[in-house]
Image (cartoon, rainbow, N blue to C red):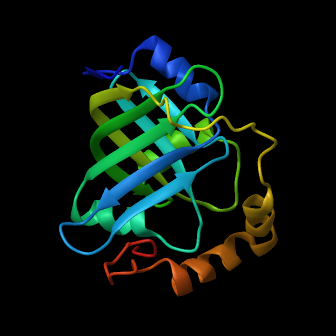
Amino acid sequence: MGKKLEFITPELRDFIIDQKIFFVGTAADEGSVNISPKGTDSFRVIDENKIIWLNLTGSGNETAAHLLKNSRMTIMFCAFEGKPLILRLYGNAKIYHRRDSEFQKHIGLFPENTGSRQIIEMDVHLVQTSCGFAVPFMDFKEERNTLNAWSSKQGIEGIEKYWESKNTQSIDGFETEILRN
């Protein structure tokens, strides 16, 4: 059944690498709780207590707004094939924008994507596994290319205009600092 660990083991790292989707949970001290599904080749385990993931342009920017208010973050993976497992990573996160040196340091770890919006770095302080016995089996068919195709069509200028109209505030009115100089 479930275990609590202080770090990501090599076996759990391998499990993470094999996953096609993960879920990110954040919340400010007040307002809405956000849970976002994330896909594509956008997650990296840096070491046993540090992960990064590439946040692509989307319809909202809740994670960024929440992390500016409260750095707590939870990431969850579920095994939809093979041995059942739910894996949660708990920690505190920082958000890096294109203007930040840390963004530039890590962006080369990911495939090029016009919609690359932020890199999130999380210091993991708790790793928890649970059984996943009730998670259904689902077969992976293929990655969706819709977001990448849309981002490429917009180009950098179009993406920045989109950020200005859709990504500067959370649904609760919190600033995201996406366009701060």
144 w.r.t. 50: above or below: below
Across and down, in percent, residue 56 comes to: 59, 59
Q: What residue is shown at x 60% (from left), y 38% (from top)?
A: 136
105 w.r.t. 155: above or below: above
7 w.r.t. 66: above or below: above
Residue 63 shown left or right of residue 78 in the figure: left
Across and down, in percent, residue 10 comes to: 46, 12
Q: What residue is shown at x 44% (from left), y 71% (from top)?
A: 178
**In the figure, residue 172 lies in which quadrant?**
bottom left
Across and down, in percent, residue 18 comes to: 63, 26
Residue 39 shown left or right of residue 76 in the figure: right
Task: Tell which residue pokes out farthest to the top in this image.
Answer: 10
Name the quarter where the C terminus is drawn.
bottom left
Q: Nearer the viewer, residue 92 or 30?
A: 30
**In the figure, residue 157 lies in which quadrant?**
bottom right
**Number of numbered discs overlaid on the protein picture:** 0
Task: Tell which residue pokes out farthest to the left in this image.
Answer: 29
Q: Nearer the viewer, residue 175 or 155?
A: 175
74 w.r.t. 113: above or below: above
Across and down, in percent, residue 8 comes to: 38, 21
Q: Nearer the viewer, residue 121 or 106?
A: 121
Residue 71 shown left or right of residue 156 in the figure: left
Q: What residue is shown at x 40% (from left), y 80% (from top)?
A: 171
**In the figure, residue 1 lies in which quadrant?**
top left
Q: Nearer the viewer, residue 116 or 76?
A: 76
Task: Tell which residue pokes out farthest to the front in this image.
Answer: 134
Q: What residue is shown at x 63% (from left), y 48% (from top)?
A: 39
